[in-house]
Amino acid sequence: MTTTHVRATCPHDCPDTCALLVTVTDGVATEVKGDPEHPTTAGVLCTKVSRYTERTYHAERLLYPLRRVGKKGEGKFERISWDEALDTIAARLKPLAASAPEAILPYSYCGTMGLVQGESMSARFFHQLGASLLDRTICASAGGTGYRYTVGATIGTDLEQFQNAKLILIWGGNPIASNLHFWTRAQEAKRRGATLIAIDPYRSLTAEKCHRHIALLPGTDAALALGMMHVLIAEDLLDHDYIADYTLGFAQLKERAAEWPPERAAEVCGIGVAELVGLARLYGQTSRDGDAVAIRANYGVQRVRGGGMAVRTIACLPALTGAWRHAAGGIQLSSSGSFPVNRAALQRPDLLKAQPRTINMTTIGDDLLRPGSPEFGPQVQAVIVYNSNPLAVAPDSSKVERGFAREDLFTVVLEHFQTDTVDYADIVLPATTQLEHVDAHLAYGHLYMMANNAAIAPMGEAKPNTEVFRLLAARMGFDDPCFRESDDALAARAFDASKAQAVHFDWEALKQKGWQKLAMPDAPFAQGGFATPSGKCEFYSAQMLADGLDPLPTHIAPYESPASNPELAAKYPLAMISPPARNFLNSTFVNIKSLRAAEGEPHLDMHPEDGAARGIGHGEMVRIFNDRGSFVAKARLTDKARRGLVVGLSVWWKKLAGDGKNANEVTSQRLTDMGRAPTFYDTLVEVEKAPA
């Protein structure tokens, strides 16, 4: 018996990007644990990833290429060989590539966050093909755009400093479910005497464990931040030296904040004036006392019409109080901008012969149903899906389903399991899991470059994404040497070692250790040095003005709310948000029985008064609906949801829900104010008892 321990990395769309130790006995992975030596993982994994062997060896793993034999959506397939699969795909793509390459569309996101398996060889393939580009904006681009306008790059407070803060605002996130290792640091700060405040429409697991919970209305975060600014300025809870030395546009910001007295801001947010004033005073006074004040802003803030502006507005707060002076102060939205990723070397955009159109992944429902036109270009005739499950995760799901159901649409899906999307595929290709391939990773919640070593041989005939696109490139006749580059060679290009923060990057050394911290300052903006055009934190952004946006922080009302759209609210009076369920990660892990059992069944949290007004009792099945569609869930009457709000934890595979639908039946394809991102939490619905 031979036992080894292989260093690996969690690939999933989570800021923690944990370092893994995989125990392998005689070629079989028997255990996945957190690496106790990795400073952020510290030997601890979430429940989902600690069961990763259950996923890898799942009885329903896709292990062989398949060809559809039933109608689209029925999920009926027959096994074929790789040669048959590749020949079929090439035969369908070659005529399109010759006449209308933009009729071919890749669709992928963060099923793996790996720089190699995510977007290296696949990007090269589609660039050489001349296919439509995909605007990959479904998660973080609104907030990232707003943050960059303000700070210059997605750089912020180091995760390893949060335990030293005296006050932590957890704004728009539920880290117990989605950022466990930040929560560990926040708990340590709490033990040391820090105050934790959750700002979230819903009293999540995290909010329940904080000292205070501010339950504002969805889409009103910018109004709260503006009200805080008003108090900070009016009561002179400011760091005037920091403002003078390291910010731009304070005079204009002061005028804007004057328009947002606490009474106005509190009314917009649906909270008490004293709540808002107390929060602002605590934020300002803690900094004035010389203590570190930190904000952990998460992506719940940005999934509304004004989401980008909301993040931009919140990101101004640390510069007003000088919170950036402290290593444990400031704000973290994402750390991804700290990593000098060598994307051009990985993705080879120089292979493009012309600039193709770009299709937004959020509007895939409309775009698959759109006929060809001079404005749109050719109708989409082929979609290659990998690292994503659009039938479950994309908004306005009924349109997505109708689009993928087109008989004339050729669909290829690379997958581990027979997801909702696989059911609509013409050809299915079995993909390797993280234990079966090589990859390199950045993180968006910490500062470590990460390596993933293959722990076991691929199961069945599964292949890494990179190998699939190498084989397809050969079938298409692409002869550039870049299509023969190995995964290790790709990983060796992942980070730009000419940049100071990654000057020590060496792929072979990284593979051996598993992780290596970037060379970043403890307090990145203690003395300015922002990556904006001015080099300062920009309260006033000339670039935003040039881009047609308000150059100052402001509140942008949701598309769908009683305040902004009273006519729609008369018909659909309840706001709905659909944050991640604790036991799922987007639509990953939903088919793992033990995790699905822990989650139970699709349910909808609603306030008891809202339930009583509709004659709905606790535990009754309800129908949630609007003009876009409907889905069914079990009602849980609870004051975790504030009045006027319902919460449907997501994202269920539709086929594993009782009615074959999920929360995205009612969400919209409308985009955010900046970053072209989705508005999942900008949704009005009505709820009624489900028909018996």
Image (cartoon, helix red, strand yellow):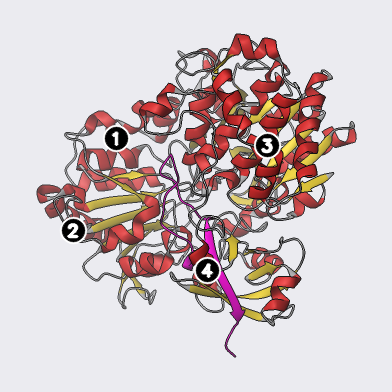
- What is the three-letter code of the residue carrying label 1? Arg
The region drawn magenta spans 664-692
**Gap between marks 3 and 1 measured at Cα:** 62 Å
- Give the mark nearer the N terminus: 1 vs 2: 2
Residue type marked 4:
Asn
Labels 3 and 1: the sequence-earlier one: 3
Closer to the eye: label 3 or 2:
3
Relative height, residue 617 to residue 670 (above, below): below
Kind of residue at badge 2: Arg
Q: For the residues marked 3 and 2, what is the alpha-carbon distance in whole angstroms?
A: 61 Å
Q: Is residue 37 visible?
A: yes
- Residue 662 is tagged as 4
Percent x, y of residue 249? 54, 18
Q: Horizontal and vertical percent for residue 480? A: 21, 32
Q: Residue at x 57, y 30 (%)?
A: 256
Residue depth check, mark 4 versus mark 1: number of the one nearer the observer: 4
Mark drawn on residue 484: 1
User: Which residue corresponds to mark 3?
Assistant: 261
> Real-space Cα distance between discs 4 and 1?
41 Å
Q: Secondary structure at mark 2?
A: helix
Q: How busy is the neighbourhood of tag 1: few (under 14 within 10 Å), some, or many (20 plus)?
A: some
User: Quick one: label 3, few (<14), some, or many (20+) residues within 10 Å?
Assistant: some
Between label 4 and label 2, give the one nearer the viewer. Answer: 4
Residue type marked 3: Pro
Q: Residues within 10 Å of mark 2 (few under 14, many from 20)?
A: few
In the image shown, does 304 or 35 lie closer to the viewer?
304
